[in-house]
Image (tube, helix red, strand yellow):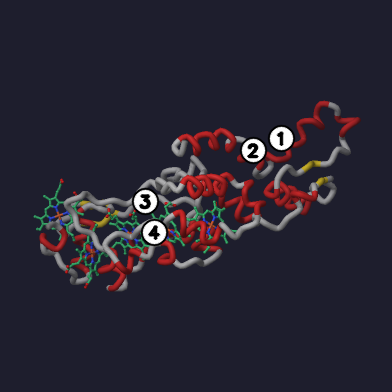
Amino acid sequence: MKSTAPQRFVSGRTLLPALLGIGVLAVLALPLLGDPGAEAKEPLRAGSVCEAHELRALQAENPGLEIEIPPEFDQQFPSWQACLSHEAAWDEEAPGPNQPIPFSHAHHAGLYEIACNYCHGGTERSQAAQVPSVELCMGCHEHFPASYDELEGIRILKQYWEEREPIPWVQIHRVPEHVQFRHNRHVAAGVDCTRCHGNVAEMEKVYLVPDRVWWQYGLPAEKLEMGWCIQCHRENEASQDCFACHY
Ligand code: HEC
Ligand code: HEC
Ligand code: HEC
Ligand code: HEC
Ligand code: HEC
């Protein structure tokens, strides 16, 4: 059930990109093209809160545009920004894997300034950074109005919650088993998350930001390779002892 759920939603998603930008005009104006004389005054009708935001923005640009917002969709939330981030987090064109839920860091950590360690508490306490549990997400989302259910990501989140199943987030940064990486040592030493992960607070969808450093004898080392770790340790007088990282 779980693994098929995102798939099922994927098909619906193909409609949404068309609603963004000028696409919305083309799609919603289709009926008008058929019979321009008779139906030209037919207003564009919103079918969701997100579409209502979209239409209001279009009308602001084209004051002549007739729009109709049914009362059930005439709401503030989800905000338009939430609709856009939700869309962008599942953008197939953007780098990085599509996660089981279109969760946006730009929205949560950027716009709403939720602290990194609220969700990744392990970075201070332990070796692993940890990804948040369904419970942690629901700690906020349980209290959100039902109108949020129009977002597929929220529906999927609630499905995991009801079935008491963990969300199978795709891990992006990973070192092999024989390597000991400890977040807490780095966080305690004041190495910022962005040094190793890029500016996650601006990402709608997380990806591995490439980084290349050079060994002192001129060979390149890519992010997460041994030379990448060692060169920073060299610059910061941190341990280069084999047994610091391998044991
Ligand atoms: C501290 C509170 C908080 C927590 C914890 C939280 N959210 Fe949110 N979430 C929000 C707020 C606030 C919004 C935006 C509301 C708006 O702008 O309309 C939001 C929006 C969203 C959206 C729509 C925008 C987007 O990012 O796609 C999704 C989906 C979402 N949250 C999923 C999650 C998931 C999954 C988790 C757990 C990993 C989570 N949230 C944890 C507060 C929270
Ligand atoms: C509301 C909860 C929440 C907040 C706040 C949050 N994250 Fe995340 N983070 C997640 C979730 C859920 C995932 C897994 C899905 C994904 O990659 O988007 C994740 C994944 C990541 C990853 C990728 C891990 C991997 O698999 O390699 C990094 C790096 C990361 N977060 C860094 C940050 C940083 C830095 C901040 C603060 C600027 C932050 N996160 C704030 C929930 C959160
Ligand atoms: C010195 C580089 C470095 C710094 C600084 C760093 N990370 Fe990481 N991060 C890594 C590496 C390497 C991995 C892969 C670890 C592994 O495979 O065990 C990782 C993995 C992660 C993961 C995935 C964990 C999982 O279990 O899926 C998250 C989330 C994460 N980091 C968040 C953060 C946050 C938040 C910060 C800042 C508080 C941070 N990182 C700072 C290098 C770093
Ligand atoms: C951006 C710089 C940077 C990168 C990249 C980096 N580190 Fe570090 N690392 C540090 C600093 C600074 C310390 C020193 C912490 C201290 O003094 O306690 C440290 C400490 C450590 C320690 C503890 C050393 C000890 O004395 O026990 C380990 C283990 C470690 N790093 C592993 C890694 C691994 C594995 C990687 C690559 C996957 C890595 N680090 C990448 C900056 C970095
Ligand atoms: C700062 C951390 C760090 C230190 C210190 C370190 N390594 Fe590594 N090592 C790594 C990481 C990360 C990898 C995995 C990525 C890779 O293969 O480049 C790795 C991989 C390896 C591998 C496997 C390469 C392969 O192709 O699978 C060997 C062998 C190795 N290290 C030996 C050593 C020896 C010998 C020393 C001491 C001279 C040492 N390492 C010191 C981080 C470190």
The quadrant of the rendered image in which ligand 3 is seen is bottom left
User: Quick check: marks 2 and 4 in contact, CB under 8 Å?
Assistant: no
Q: Residue drawn 80% across and 29% down?
A: 33
Query: Horizontally, is 178 left or right of 112 in the view?
Result: left
Query: Furthest residue to the front?
Result: 163
Callout 4 crowding tier (Cα within 10 Å): few <14, some 14–19, many ≥20 = some
Looking at the rendered structure, which numbered label has been put on residue 198?
Answer: 4
Callout 1 crowding tier (Cα within 10 Å): few <14, some 14–19, many ≥20 = few
Q: What residue is shown with label 1?
A: 27
Callout 3 crowding tier (Cα within 10 Å): few <14, some 14–19, many ≥20 = some
Mark 4 vs ligand 2: CB under 8 Å?
yes
The residue tagged with tag 2: helix, strand or loop?
Answer: helix
Nearer to us in this view, 226 or 79: 79
Total marks in image = 4
Q: Earlier in the sequence, mark 2 or mark 4?
A: 2
Q: Amino acid at mark 1?
A: Val
Q: Residue drawn 49% across and 66% down?
A: 114
Q: Earlier in the sequence, mark 4 or mark 3?
A: 4
Coordinates of residue 88 in the picture (x, y in percent): 54, 48
Q: Earlier in the sequence, mark 3 or mark 2?
A: 2
Tell me the CA gap for discs 3 and 1: 35 Å
Coordinates of residue 64 in the picture (x, y in percent): 85, 48
User: Quick check: marks 3 and 2 in contact, CB under 8 Å?
Assistant: no
Coordinates of residue 100 in the picture (x, y in percent): 46, 44
Tell me the CA gap for discs 1 and 4: 37 Å
Tell me the CA gap for discs 3 and 2: 28 Å
Q: What residue is shown with label 3?
A: 208
User: Quick check: marks 2 and 1 in contact, CB under 8 Å?
Assistant: yes
The residue tagged with tag 1: helix, strand or loop?
Answer: helix
